[in-house]
Amino acid sequence: MNGYVIAALILAIFFCIGCIRIGGGASLGDEGLTAWVRLGPKKLVLYPMKPKPEKKPQKKPKPQKPPKPRKEKPPKPKTSLGSKLREGKLLADIFVPIALEAAKGFFYKLQIDVLELYIHVGAYDPADGAVLYGRANALAAAVWLPLNQAFRIREGRVRVDWDPLAEKLVCAGQLALSLRIGEILWIGLRFGLKALAGFLRYRRLKRKAV
């Protein structure tokens, strides 16, 4: 097996790993709130947590030796409030645009795999039920349109039902988000290099200000 084949296999492995999606989600229903994280096909439930097994009685701790006296460090020279504010403004000018650009790139790559919203409106009075049903539809439309414009939604559903036997408004739904490992690594590498360049620039400007 020559070097080209080995290199091709390594690239294929990294490509397959980069295509694995990781993410998480939550659902709200009759059983309450459930939250999980996902790595590929595997799902790990975070809430509600499983009860932990009972711990065995711990042994008595051994007597500890008295701590050795520490040497006092010389006090550091105090910096003025004005210099701290100047440093803070310099850090904000350099790193805030990088952080905002990274967040924008992250949310652009983020995919909503499942978005489900169910609203059940209940009222004994048909007139009150009609008013609540109209308001619930308006609320669902107001939320649904911006979400579709801001994110890539792979599978989305919204439904408003009127149940005359119910006594109150009940909401249920599910949300699942994911991102490819390759996209996370690319975003981290790209903006990590920008952050490193910004840090070097900050040190250079700080030396000039001294």
Image (cartoon, rainbow, N blue to C red):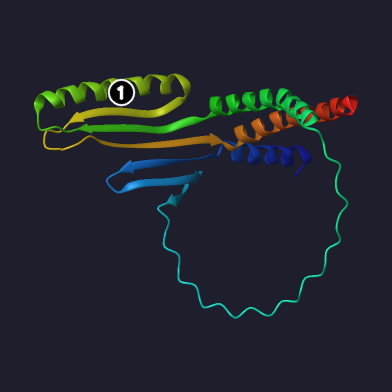
Which residue type does callout 1 highlight? Answer: Leu
Q: Residues within 10 Å of mark 1 (few under 14, many from 20)?
A: few
Q: Is residue 124 left or right of residue 49?
A: left
> Mark 1 — residue?
139
Secondary structure at badge 1 equals helix
Residue 22 appears in view: yes
Q: Is residue 73 left or right of residue 155?
A: right
Residue at point 31% right, 24% down?
Answer: 140
User: Relative to 56, does residue 15 appear above or below in the rendering?
Assistant: above
Residue at point 22% right, 33% down?
Answer: 120
Residue found farthest to the left: 125
Across and down, in percent, residue 208 comes to 90, 25
Quarter the N terminus occupies: top right
Residue at point 55% right, 39% down?
Answer: 20
| Quadrant in which residue 60 is drawn | bottom right
Quarter the C terminus occupies: top right
Q: Is residue 94 left or right of residue 143?
A: right
Residue at point 82% right, 36% down?
Answer: 79
Q: Nearer the viewer, residue 154 or 177?
A: 177
Q: Is residue 104 left or right of residue 191?
A: left
Across and down, in percent, residue 154 comes to 42, 28
Across and down, in percent, residue 187 comes to 65, 30
User: Relative to 191, does residue 26 appear above or below in the rendering?
Assistant: below
